[in-house]
Amino acid sequence: MSFELTDNGGLGQLFLEGFDLEKQRRVNPRFSNKVLIVLKPPVALAERIFTDASCHAAGRTKRAAHPAELLHITLLCVGCFDTVPRGFANRLKAALAEIKARPVPITFDGSSLFGNRSCLALSSRREMLELRALAKMVQRALWRANLPFVAASSFTPHLTVVYGCGKIDIMPVEKPYSWLAGSFELIFSHNGQTRHESLARFPLSAKADRYEQPESQLYLPEKIFRPQKRSAHKMAAR
């Protein structure tokens, strides 16, 4: 697999699945900052989530709740870099700007342990099909532009509220955390600095086409599955 990037520095910094991770770490010892495509909750809701997570974490773990301004849903991890790959980021912006999609309704009504049960995250009993469809559109946009990204085996919508907490009790959610996401964002996550650097924001429009349905929910006429009836004449001949 090969990709053409606008700057050789960006390509040299990029980590992709299938590369020798130890070799990459020898080349770049601070191999932990990430370029992500994310959705973020509104400020007031993020503060509420942070407050609830802080109360739950108290006395259960030494880890603090993730800061409100850093709470996010990852649609796609593009890769890991030492510094912001400016040329590559410009190509990402151009590709993502081509996406025409509707605002996404999001609801988290529960919590669970993610990442080998080491992180506490909000989860949902709903499928959130629009969110899954948007994640697919993001991947397709980068694929069409011949841009690399870290391809996950599956997409499970979640929002991590406490990192590295270990096996603690899950957080009860008495009132669901819901919002209508009106944009998604390209960010550079500075590992260890509790800081997100916003590279671009992309609005979602109610005028866009409806999200495509997953194959499992596509309507197929009943006659496709109904076995053909043999005529009485053919049955008698047998």
Image: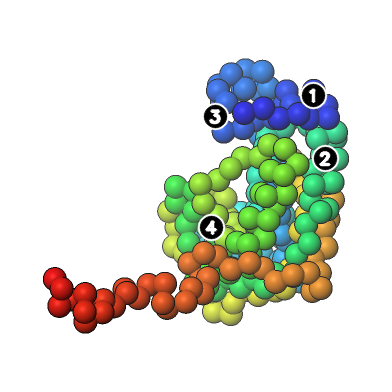
The foreground one among 144 and 17 is: 144
Q: Disc 1 and disc 3: Cα gap in Å? A: 20 Å
Residue 227 position, x and y percent, is 31, 73
The reply to whether discs 4 and 1 touch (Cβ–Cβ < 8 Å) is no
Give the Cα separation between the discs numbered 4 and 2: 27 Å
Lower sequence index among marks 4 and 1:
1
> What is the CA distance from the residue labelled 3 to the residue labelled 4?
22 Å
Mark 2 lies on a secondary structure that is: helix
Residue under label 2: 91
Instruction: Tell me the crowding category of disc 4: few under 14, some 14 to 19, or many 20 or more residues within 10 angstroms, Cα based.
Output: some
The quarter in which the N terminus is drawn is top right
Foreground label between 1 and 2: 2
**Which-is-in-front pick, marks 3 and 4?**
3
Figure label count: 4
At x 78% / y 30%, what residue is drawn?
A: 5
Distance Cα–Cα, label 3 vs label 2 = 23 Å
Residue designated by label 1: 9
> Which one is in front, 203 or 177?
203
Question: Which of labels 4 and 2 is toward the front?
Answer: 2
**Residue 14 left/right relative to 226:** right
What residue sits 61% from the left and 40% below the top? 150
